[in-house]
Image: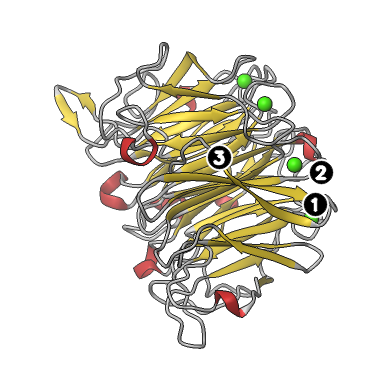
Amino acid sequence: MGLKHKVWLAVGGVVLGGTGAMAYADTGAGANAGTGTVGKAAVLVAAVPRAHADRGALTVVPGGTGGPDAAARKALTQSSPGVPGLDEPGDAWAAATALGDLNGDGHPDLVIGAPGEDDTSGHRDRGAVTMLYGPGFTSGADLQLSEDFAYSNARFGSAVAAGDFNKDGKDDVFAVSTGTGGSWAARFSTGHEAAGTFQSGERAIAYPSATSGDFDHDGYADVALTYRDAAGHGRLVWFKGTRSGLGRVGHLSVKGGRSVAAGDVNGDGYDDLVVGQPYTAESGAHAGGQVTVVNGGPGGPTGGARTVHQATGGVPGAAEAGDAMGWSVAAADVDGDGCADVLTGAPGEDITRAGKARTDAGTSLLLKGSRSGLTGAGALAVSQDEPDVPGVTETGDRLGSSVALADFDGNGHPDLAVGADGEDRGDGTVLHVGTDADGAVLRASGTYYGKARLGTAAGARLGQVLGAGS
Ligand SMILES: [Ca+2]
Ligand SMILES: [Ca+2]
Ligand SMILES: [Ca+2]
Ligand SMILES: [Ca+2]
């Protein structure tokens, strides 16, 4: 798969500790997936790290002509055949996930972070990162790292990403630890590794989320990471892919947030960095949160920045403290105009239905990319009370807890997937909304993938972490 055909996206969904899920979606036409689809339908990965006393689990749902094919789903835990590690309470397995073709066989493989995994040397919450090979996901391996990472509360695997950093045709793995100022590691398909730290000090960072995209358009996939530093400020750092691997370039002047995605929002050929900034205190964001796009260019994601919030013209809803717009972000060109569009969740949005305010019902917003960057013009809200969308809003649904954009039905246009991890008192659900042949969003097509359809445990908060790829 050529890099130029890929649209990289990420979704963040953070409830405990720090979780984010990253993935990429190939929106180009591909080989028939063999399930009767017209194109290469993307798979949906729904992770539930809080399931079964925080042991964690995930479900891979292949795409099909009608969207994600729940009947063909594959449920995975650390107890599944071929999955490394022991399934123990508190592992938070799949707190972060990414998809990439790690072995170059044309099938997406899984990268799975388990920041609560203890090691066999007595290091509690050292964390682990597992690679599982598709399409079977019955064989895999853990990332083997130097002893520098062997300490308690390292929480390795709090964020993960996949991309072909060294351009050898196989995707590589990026992973983050949050202990002692934070550190990163990359594992290349060639077998060698790189690693480094973010900042000095013993205090942990929090809420990391990573994505991969080619921000400087040199053919080598790069990485962008957001996290909250020990002082409570959102930070952004980017890493440049090269023939010899991946190297940390530096922090950006734009503040970080809770979620990141990559996509060419202004259509100039450089992937741009999309940052979800839900909180004023962390990011200097507008009340209620915002999404900022930092333009890619020859020097990476360091170009001009453009911000959209609910007070921006054209954006539905009102900007109120606590809405948490930007909690999750994904980027892909939904309408096919050559500019990646951005789907963002605002799980703290209150919605009034039948005269009663439903606190934290949540919403999601599809924001359009344009030649001049991200815009509020033409923005679309997808919540349970929007016209045609099935379901009704309830207090605490938290719709928008995660988002993904990928072509789940293989019609050539990315579809929307929106998590609502508070639905039905914490069972959670995922809302899939399709798009037509022109890329128009079909809100009436909304279908829920809840506990019964995906077989997740009660109270697992399905919709906390979503990923997609093909
Ligand atoms: Ca590679
Ligand atoms: Ca690059
Ligand atoms: Ca661009
Ligand atoms: Ca577009």
Looking at the image, is mark 1 or mark 2 nearer the viewer?
2
**Identity of the amino acid at label 3?**
Leu
Which quarter shows the C terminus?
top right
- Image coordinates of residue 21 in percent, x first then y, are 52, 50
Measure the alpha-carbon separation of dots 1 and 2.
Answer: 8 Å
**Identity of the amino acid at label 2?**
Met
Viewer-proximal residue among 284 and 425: 284
Q: Residues within 10 Å of mark 1 (few under 14, many from 20)?
A: some
Establish if 132 lies above or below 396: below
- Image coordinates of residue 325 in percent, x first then y, are 38, 32
Looking at the image, is mark 3 or mark 2 nearer the viewer?
3
Note whether residue 272 is visible: yes
Q: Which residue is mark 2?
A: 1
Viewer-proximal residue among 198 and 106: 198
Write the residue at 82% across / 49% down. Answer: 167
- Image coordinates of residue 417 in percent, x first then y, are 50, 37
Q: Which mark is residue 252?
A: 3
Q: Which residue is mark 1?
A: 106
Which quarter shows the N terminus?
top right
Label 1 or label 3, whichever comes before in sequence order: 1
